[in-house]
Image (tube, rainbow, N blue to C red):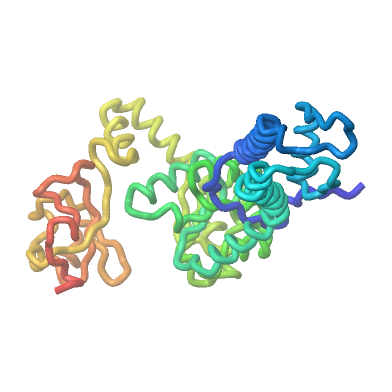
């Protein structure tokens, strides 16, 4: 038996819904149509002396006759057995009932067209989104790790519109849509699904599925589609890190080892464990950050800066702050620092206080 439901292997783009509930829209239109119908019935009935019923010898217009006349008039059927005869009734028909007929028809036709055109409109939105999407971030897997990664990106200045979620679970993609994220329902090991996410134009890809074998296969597929993307992948077991790197991942995070190490530190030294947890929590206490070198800091020792420097990035390599190679900071260096999560004057974020960085100078 064939099914109309989309296969999880076939990518389906779902953009965040910016409209009201369809039931709300349908209910609103039904109420408007009912109001037009009831209002026209009452208008005809109160002016019933101005109408003539060709099938009634007494020429009496009842409430049922008014309802009948209204329905055949608004639907443009117009049998002609009941008709306005007085100038006042004809004027009301011309100025009030005719516009009501037009509004009634537009309402019905608009509802029908809305239903028929919804799929086409969604396809147009997806095509427009795909045309605009470039240099974005693709997050594969919208579980706990994926959500945390996205919140960290957003907290560091990324726009939600520049993040695309891929997940085979429809509930996860629905949740991503509720979080105002573009979501694609599909299996990320399929090239077609990755192309739906426009991964060939992405600058970063974050892979956070719960299975190491799936992560390896996704990494291989992403690397084939986009040789230049920076791929960050998570693995549960440390023994799979070399395999993940061979598959094309630029950075590999071992979730089980990290959790186990934090548990061990917390057992040996509860205070050290709390500090490590603080460093991993964004927006509270201390944070690890990467920033540009300021012009005023060129030629200084890393230990002499207000920020607690723990690493220096030079020529695409990371040096510890005590390494003799970076004993004096040079133009173009970038710093990895530990500083308060709350921005302070002595720990500025470049660009927020008007400082000149070495890249701008």
Residue 334 x/y as whole percent: 23, 63
Q: Nearer the viewer, residue 45 or 152?
A: 45
The residue at 17%/63% (across/down) is 293
Above or below — where is 145 with respect to 322? above
Q: x, y percentage for residue 219?
A: 58, 60
Hey, which residue is sitting farthest bottom in the picture? 361
145 on left or right of 286: right
At x 10%, y 48%, the residue is: 345
In this rendering, the count of numbered labels is 0
Q: Position of residue 348 (x, y in %)?
A: 15, 53
- Quadrant hosting residue 322: bottom left
Q: Does any portion of residue 204 appear in the rendered image? A: yes
User: Quick check: can you spot residue 23?
Assistant: no
* Depth check, front residue: 46 or 221: 46
Task: Give percent across and percent down for residue 346.
Answer: 9, 49
Res 44 → quadrant: top right
Check the picture and name the quadrant holding the C terminus.
bottom left
Residue at left offset 59%, top offset 42%: 174
Instruction: Please determine whether, in this image, residue 280 is positioned above or below residue 221.
Output: above
Q: Nearer the viewer, residue 6 or 339?
A: 6
The reply, left or right, for residue 274 in relation to residue 174 is: left
Q: Between residues 31 and 116, which one lies in front from this camera angle?
A: 31
- Give above or below for 105 relative to 265: below
In the rendered view, does 361 fall on the left or right side of 207?
left
Q: Quadrant of residue 191?
A: bottom right
Q: Tell me the residue at 25%/68% (across/down).
A: 314
């Amino acid at each position: 038996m064939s099914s109309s439901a989309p296969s999880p292997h076939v990518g389906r783009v779902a953009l965040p819904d910016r409209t009201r509930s369809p039931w709300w829209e349908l209910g609103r239109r039904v109420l408007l149509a009912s109001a037009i119908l009831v209002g026209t019935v009452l208008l005809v009935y109160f002016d019933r002396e101005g109408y003539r019923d060709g099938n009634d010898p007494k020429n009496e217009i009842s409430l049922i006759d008014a309802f009948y006349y209204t329905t055949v008039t608004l639907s443009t059927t117009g049998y002609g057995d009941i008709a306005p005869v007085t100038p006042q009734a004809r004027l009301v028909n011309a100025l009030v009932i005719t516009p009501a007929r037009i509004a009634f028809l537009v309402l019905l036709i608009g509802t029908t067209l809305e239903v028929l055109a919804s799929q086409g409109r969604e396809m147009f939105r997806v095509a427009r989104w795909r045309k605009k999407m470039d240099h974005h971030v693709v997050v594969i897997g919208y579980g706990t790790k994926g959500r945390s990664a996205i919140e960290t990106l957003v907290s560091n200045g990324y726009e939600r519109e520049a993040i695309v979620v891929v997940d085979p679970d429809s509930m996860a993609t629905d949740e991503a849509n509720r979080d105002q994220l573009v979501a694609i329902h599909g299996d990320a090991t399929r090239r077609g699904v990755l192309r739906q996410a426009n991964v060939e134009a992405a600058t970063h890809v974050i892979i956070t599925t719960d299975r190491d074998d799936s992560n390896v296969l996704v990494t291989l597929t992403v690397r084939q589609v986009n040789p230049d993307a920076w791929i960050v992948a998570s693995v549960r077991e440390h023994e799979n890190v070399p395999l993940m790197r061979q598959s094309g991942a630029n950075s590999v995070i071992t979730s089980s080892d990290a959790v186990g190490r934090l548990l061990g530190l917390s057992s040996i030294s509860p205070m050290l464990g709390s500090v490590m947890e603080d460093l991993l929590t964004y927006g509270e206490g201390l944070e690890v950050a990467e920033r540009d070198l300021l012009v005023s800091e060129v030629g200084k020792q890393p230990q002499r800066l207000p920020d607690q420097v723990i690493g220096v990035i030079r020529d695409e390599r990371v040096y510890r702050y005590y390494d003799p190679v970076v004993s004096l900071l040079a133009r173009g260096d970038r710093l990895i620092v530990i500083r308060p999560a709350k921005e302070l004057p002595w720990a500025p974020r470049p660009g927020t206080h008007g400082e000149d960085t070495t890249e701008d100078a």
